[in-house]
Image: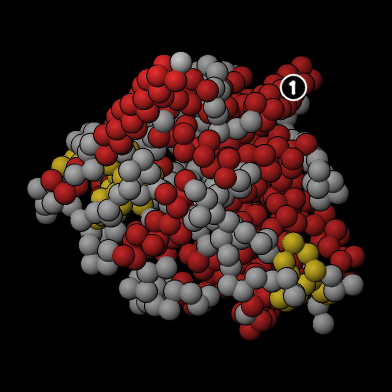
């Protein structure tokens, strides 16, 4: 019996050793990939490659890739391994421009899996690859013109008034507030009314369904981070485990919310100045005219577009509008308020501009009023430089490409990382990068970096389609707040910011705690 047990134990040990050896070989066999190509690279570890600190929840990915960016000063690009996958990090702004614009046809995808049948909300504009992305982008472009922004502005303004009323009480008592949550409630209300035509009431009810679903999607936890890594880098395993970026409850909630809204509007012939109405028009194959002055009213949709706007595809677009619209703008707003609180001279200058321009416009905070506030624009731009919502951008090589001035070939399927946070904090491009200085964006300022060192919304054909919307609601929020209130650090304000390691976007691990008071 003892001999049988020893034999069984030996077999198990040999089996485990063989399995571990096979796994080691599988995860390391190509670790000489960049060395053979003469590319400087970060030394990888078995299984993790270079992703140990991200996989274990030690670093926010924007900060992680910034560290690698900083470590290879003077290099145009750096080889990495995301688990066992060879990846190239780009440092040279001219090369980044080549990838994002000049040779976009070789780098048009983001490499995010789309499982339309089992996860219909994954088929949105941000994720879709190739021809389907292009066709959908053409269809959706007219919904984000300056004319459409003006059309929806009154809906945003109503939400800013609700925000002002909500903050009167805390401000009169000089209370401390966690501003990222307050700003998320504000932007949830805006995107809810503009995308869904619904009153979210997030300001009044922080546990409203839409706010709760938003928190679920952007959950900053190690488990959520690991799930995302498995989906992107171990997709067969993710399919086997039926993993998705969004919780099943989130999928069902948004699918039902959109379908019910569409059915109700179509049944009662309701038309409203919002994205949902524009999406319904696309679904019904009505042609949308781009009323932007820069395109002279050209029709951007045509009968050759090879994409059918089904209910599920419509829901997926509304879903991503909601997520991108509330999360990125609330991130921008809360970080801007944080810097204004720490820099009272900048806050005072911006408030003076708000007061002056409001007076010139009869005290009304209109769409045109915001366009006449140049310093507000610079404060927003500097906030986006220092705290870009997306710390990195990803592109996939879709067609073999030779890096200019080298004999190095990027093979089809290779993932590229553009380290936005690294570029934004590089002292070569932005002297004294940790200093908050809106003056960097003064016209003609020679200390402002190369165009492709400033990428808060991406660049090229895949630049964020909702950029105008995000900037507009952020400027409106800041102007409305500074009109009535002032902000200062509280006992719980974290200086400097400690970044949330497992977050999808740039975020403070401790929240943004500030004291709010009425203007003196």
x, y percent for residue 174: 85, 74
Looking at the image, the residue that sits furthest to the left is 407
509 up-or-down from 195: above or below: below
Judge by depth and name the residue closer to the eye, 219 or 209.
Answer: 219
| Rendering quarter of residue 234 | top left
| Residue drawn at the location 37% of the way across and 28% of the way down | 13
| Residue drawn at the location 75% of the way across and 75% of the way down | 491
Quadrant of the snapshot with the C terminus: bottom right
Q: Can residue 145 be seen at all in this image of the molecule? A: no
Left or right: where 299 falls relative to 19: right
505 up-or-down from 262: above or below: below
Judge by depth and name the residue closer to the eye, 71 or 438.
Answer: 71
| Rendering quarter of residue 104 | top left
Are there few (<14), some (14-19), or many (20+) residues within 10 Å of tag 1?
few
x, y percent for residue 148: 60, 43
Q: Can residue 171 be seen at all in this image of the molecule? A: yes
| Residue drawn at the location 33% of the way across and 43% of the way down | 46
Judge by depth and name the residue closer to the eye, 511 or 475.
Answer: 511
| Residue drawn at the location 53% of the way across and 42% of the way down | 225
Looking at the image, the residue that sits furthest to the front is 2
Left or right: where 362 falls relative to 64: right
x, y percent for residue 177: 78, 64
Judge by depth and name the residue closer to the eye, 291 or 386.
Answer: 386
Q: Which residue is mark 1?
A: 260
Left or right: where 445 falls relative to 388: left
Q: How is the image coloured?
A: secondary structure
Count of numbered tags:
1
Of helix, strand and loop, which one carries label 1? helix
| Rendering quarter of residue 507 | bottom right
x, y percent for residue 407: 9, 48
């Amino acid at each position: 019996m003892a001999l049988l047990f020893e034999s069984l134990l030996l077999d198990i040990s040999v089996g485990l050793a063989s399995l571990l050896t096979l796994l080691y070989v599988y995860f390391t066999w190509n670790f000489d990939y960049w060395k053979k190509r003469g590319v400087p690279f970060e030394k990888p570890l078995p299984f993790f490659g270079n992703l140990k600190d991200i996989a274990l929840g030690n670093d926010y990915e924007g900060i992680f890739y910034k560290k690698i960016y900083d470590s290879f000063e003077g290099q145009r690009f750096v080889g990495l391994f995301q688990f066992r996958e060879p990846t190239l990090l780009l440092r040279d702004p001219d090369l980044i421009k080549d990838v994002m614009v000049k040779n976009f046809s070789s780098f048009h995808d983001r490499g995010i899996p789309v499982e339309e049948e089992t996860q219909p909300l994954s088929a949105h504009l941000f994720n879709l690859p190739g021809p389907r992305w292009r066709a959908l982008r053409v269809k959706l472009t007219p919904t984000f013109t300056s004319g459409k922004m003006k059309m929806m502005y009154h809906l945003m303004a109503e939400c800013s008034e609700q925000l002002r009323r909500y903050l009167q009480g805390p401000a009169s008592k000089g209370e401390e507030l966690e501003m990222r949550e307050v700003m998320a409630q504000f932007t949830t209300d805006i995107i809810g009314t503009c995308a869904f035509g619904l009153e979210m009431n997030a300001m009044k009810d922080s546990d409203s369904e839409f706010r709760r679903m938003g928190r679920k999607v952007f959950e900053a936890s190690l488990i959520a981070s690991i799930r995302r890594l498995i989906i992107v880098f171990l997709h067969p395993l993710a399919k086997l485990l039926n993993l998705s970026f969004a919780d099943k409850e989130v999928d069902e909630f948004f699918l039902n919310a959109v379908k019910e809204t569409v059915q109700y509007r179509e049944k009662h012939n309701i038309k409203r100045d919002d994205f949902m109405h524009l999406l319904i028009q696309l679904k019904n194959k009505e042609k949308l005219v781009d009323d932007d002055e820069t395109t002279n009213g050209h029709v951007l949709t045509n009968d050759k577009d090879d994409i059918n706007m089904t209910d599920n595809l419509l829901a997926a677009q509304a879903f991503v509008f909601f997520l991108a619209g509330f999360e990125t703008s609330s991130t921008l707003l809360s970080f801007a308020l944080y810097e204004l609180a720490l820099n009272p001279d900048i806050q005072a200058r911006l408030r003076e501009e708000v007061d002056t321009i409001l007076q010139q416009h009869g005290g009304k905070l209109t769409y045109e009023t915001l366009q006449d506030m140049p310093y507000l624009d610079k404060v927003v731009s500097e906030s986006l430089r220092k705290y870009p919502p997306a710390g990195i951008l990803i592109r996939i090589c879709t067609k073999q490409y030779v890096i200019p001035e080298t004999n190095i070939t990027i093979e089809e399927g290779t993932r590229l990382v553009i380290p936005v946070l690294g570029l934004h904090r590089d002292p070569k491009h932005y002297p004294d990068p940790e200093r908050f200085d809106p003056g960097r964006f003064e016209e003609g300022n020679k200390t402002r970096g190369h165009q492709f060192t400033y990428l808060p919304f991406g660049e090229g054909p895949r630049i964020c389609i909702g950029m105008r919307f995000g900037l507009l609601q952020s400027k409106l929020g800041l102007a409305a707040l500074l009109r009535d209130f002032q902000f200062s650090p509280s006992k719980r304000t974290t200086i400097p910011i400690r970044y949330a390691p497992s977050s999808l976007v740039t975020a403070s691990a401790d929240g943004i705690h500030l004291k709010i008071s009425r203007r003196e």
